[in-house]
Image (spheres, rainbow, N blue to C red):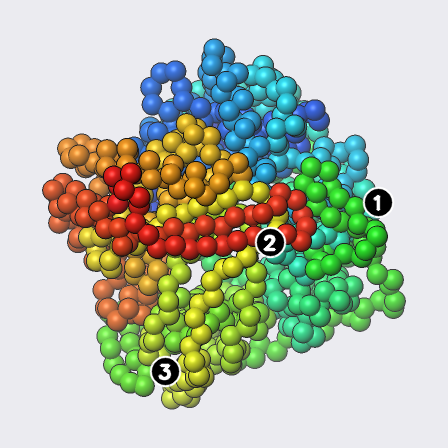
Amino acid sequence: MTDWRELPPRGLPPGSRLAEGRLANGLEVRLAEVPSARQARLALGVAAGWLDEPPRHRGLAHLLEHCLFHPRREGLALADWVGAVGGRYNARTSEATTDYHLSLPAAQLAEGLARLVDLVAAPDLLADEAAPEAVAREIAVIDAEFRARRGDPALHRLAALSRLVAAEHPARGCHAGHRLSLDGVTSAALRRFHRRHYRAPRMVLASLAPQPLAQQWAALCAAGQRLPAGDEASAGRRAVDDRRWAGLGGVAWRSPGVSGALELLWPLRPGIRAQHAAALEALALGLEDGELAAALCRRGWLQDLSATAWPEGAGEALALTLRLSESGERHWGEAAELCRSRLASLLARSDDPGAPARLPEEALATWPQRQVRRHCALNRCRAEAPAPAVQLSGTLPRLLLACRELPPGQVRRVPESATPWVPLAWPRRGPPPPPWPGEADPGPWVVASQRRGHQGPRRCAERPVTVWRGGTSRRPWLCLGWPAAGERLAAWETASLPLRQAFRARGGELWLGEDARGAWLALRGEEALPPVAMALLEAWPRAAPPRAPGAGLLAQRLLARLSQVEATPSLPLCWAEAPPAAMLRRRLLAVASAAVAGDRPDRPREASVAPAGEGTALMLLLQGKSTPLERLCLRLLAQCHDRPFLVEMRERRGLGYVAAVRYREAAGQPRLGYVVQSPGADAETLRLAIEDFLAVQGRALLPSGGDELARRLAALRADLAVPESEAEAWRCQWQALREGACEPDWRRLERALEALDGDVLRGCLERLLARPDAWQWHRLQAAACHLGRSEAAGERHSSAISPRSGAP
């Protein structure tokens, strides 16, 4: 067993420590000590995914991921144990990696690690007598997922991308898995796949927790050494990327709800990403520095731009994605040439182009998953010999263009997903694009002095602009809020894109938002912030644009309604280290006046869905009152009901693959949604199933007191404790000020939680479940299971549960 070595904690909150190591069996370990972390987050990644599946059984890696969560013969299943301690779990299969991740109360770190390793080390389901029935049931779940995802643009993007892959390469086929592709799969085939790939040298285990590194290392060693060892090379490395791409230059494709998306993919030689990861990530950040976005926005072509060295489903490649306007879609060739020219200028500038002045803090909740996915992918493509430097300037990228309409008469369809597509050639190249201009004028940014002290927020001015001063941040900040009418955030994000990217490239942090209290803007950085805020306010749209049609899974779009409430008027609001200049106040007041001028339009109801996919999604929504007690009770209901609801709907009733209980808040108003999406059941069947669950199990699952109640409250306390980072604390304080309160929301909830006892809690839960006026039904139904011009319906009902249920 080797020791661990400490690394610079880049991207983690102040006071954190980061380390890596490798166990004697070959398991790679990444661990982060974050004293402010509320929970322990764990992830175990396996360097095996779509590319490792046998051609006869596409989806086998996904099926194994499902089967590993099957209950064990002895003891409590991982999923049930995680639910019992108030945690969360999930898994994901991608091209090169399968990862399993948990979020738990910090005290459960050691047991969570042991159970996570046990999940993947020895899957006794595959040797169980009940294995054939269990495998058949999971194939049915995966088939339901595939049928529902035929309305998901992400699936159609992968299908279109597969047309750019060589016919003999394993990335060519459909990887989602369904009933036909998995027909004939046995537990023996799953055992062979597991034995070949689920070995310690092909795994990465990551942990982020408040415990010291030494304590985490001891727990990781105790758990990780139980993973079977083996020769890393014995699993083989299929799918060599230098043989991945076909001669086809590009694909134009169509999917409901997506248009004008242009993706440029520059393939990389094997080993480039492993040995030059920092340079590639800096190159991606350089493409997002605001210059390219400004050039495209000046022509009216761009709505959004992003770059990554880790594109989904594209192997080793650098990807640049543009969301184009209707005009930009017509000029996609010129847009692509501008992108190619910008990339060439970045490559010519230096070996480390576009590195940011200061890395923002990473999201702690997903840090372990990012670590295992990245390091599993690096392990797969690590070359023996040194890889050459990154050379992309003379390379024509592969193209993916999501169109509104495809040329008639030439349309082909991808087997299984039925995605329509046509070959796309790079436009005729005229003279080479002119050299990219030099560094842009830094504009309004000037370096500001560091802040010297800290003070609590205090109100220092009232109408027409409410001003708060002071705070606890170590960096200068400025927050602005104003009333907003209609759906303007997307238009604002488009208009302000170059400025936002340039600000972030200089080390600043920026958030935009719009909710029932209005729109808001928050800035943090070492620069003079008022000029940046003024420029961003200038980009605020004077009129609300038409709402774009929805896209994606029906259940996800129903869950999005949990956060939607009717807008309420509010005064312009400012929070800053010092009172803002009069010019900024006047500009804020002008924007607020323009935003509320005229009639306030109602928030439009979603009346149609993408004409693809299959099935019905139904949500029963419980709406509580904005009191700390009811908010805590609804959180507790979500915690107690989520896992049993999944088991009842998916495993016992076979009603599709989406079955979830989710808690959300909209302007402080607590809401709880019970959502089921099924490709084979109508709305009435789903409604009766949800009613029966609440009637039979709803009250029985509530904590009765003693150890169970203490465990549930401890899990709630861990979820509501002190913010995990300075940025989170700062955002919590800003949202509290938007509500007109000096005290952050988590403090109020924490006090209410301390005052709870079993009788008070159970009485509140009973009152919530017995209020029929608080329940609403929402439904979305896709009318077709293939791409075409079919209609779909969206409905909403306010109703009591039927008397037969005996529930609310």
Q: Position of residue 213 (x, y in %)?
A: 36, 38
Q: Position of residue 725 (x, y in %)?
A: 35, 55
In this rendering, the label closer to the viewer, 2 or 3: 2
Q: Position of residue 693 (x, y in %)?
A: 33, 35
Query: Badge 3 local density, few (<14 within 10 Å), some, or many (20+)?
Result: some
* Measured Cα–Cα span from mark 2 to mark 1: 38 Å
In this rendering, the label closer to the viewer, 1 or 3: 1
Q: Earlier in the sequence, mark 2 or mark 1?
A: 1
Q: Secondary structure at mark 2?
A: loop
- The picture quadrant where one finds residue 474 is bottom left
**For residue 417, side relative to residue 246 (left or right):** left
Q: Earlier in the sequence, mark 1 or mark 3?
A: 1
* Measured Cα–Cα span from mark 2 to mark 3: 51 Å
Residue at image location 54% in from the left, 42% down from the top: 615
Badge 3 is on which residue? 580
Q: Position of residue 746 (x, y in %)?
A: 26, 56
The one of 321 and 277 positioned closer to us in this rendering: 321
The one of 610 and 742 positioned closer to us in this rendering: 610
Q: Is residue 616 above or below residue 67?
A: below
* Measured Cα–Cα span from mark 1 to mark 3: 58 Å
Residue at image location 61% in from the left, 45% down from the top: 784
Viewer can see residue 547: yes
Badge 2 is on which residue? 791
Amino acid type of the residue tagged 2 in the rendering:
Glu
Q: Secondary structure at mark 3?
A: loop
**For residue 269, side relative to residue 733 (left or right):** right
Query: Badge 2 local density, few (<14 within 10 Å), some, or many (20+)?
Result: some
Residue at image location 65% in from the left, 72% down from the top: 297
Q: Secondary structure at mark 1?
A: loop
Amino acid type of the residue tagged 3 in the rendering:
Pro
Badge 1 is on which residue? 247
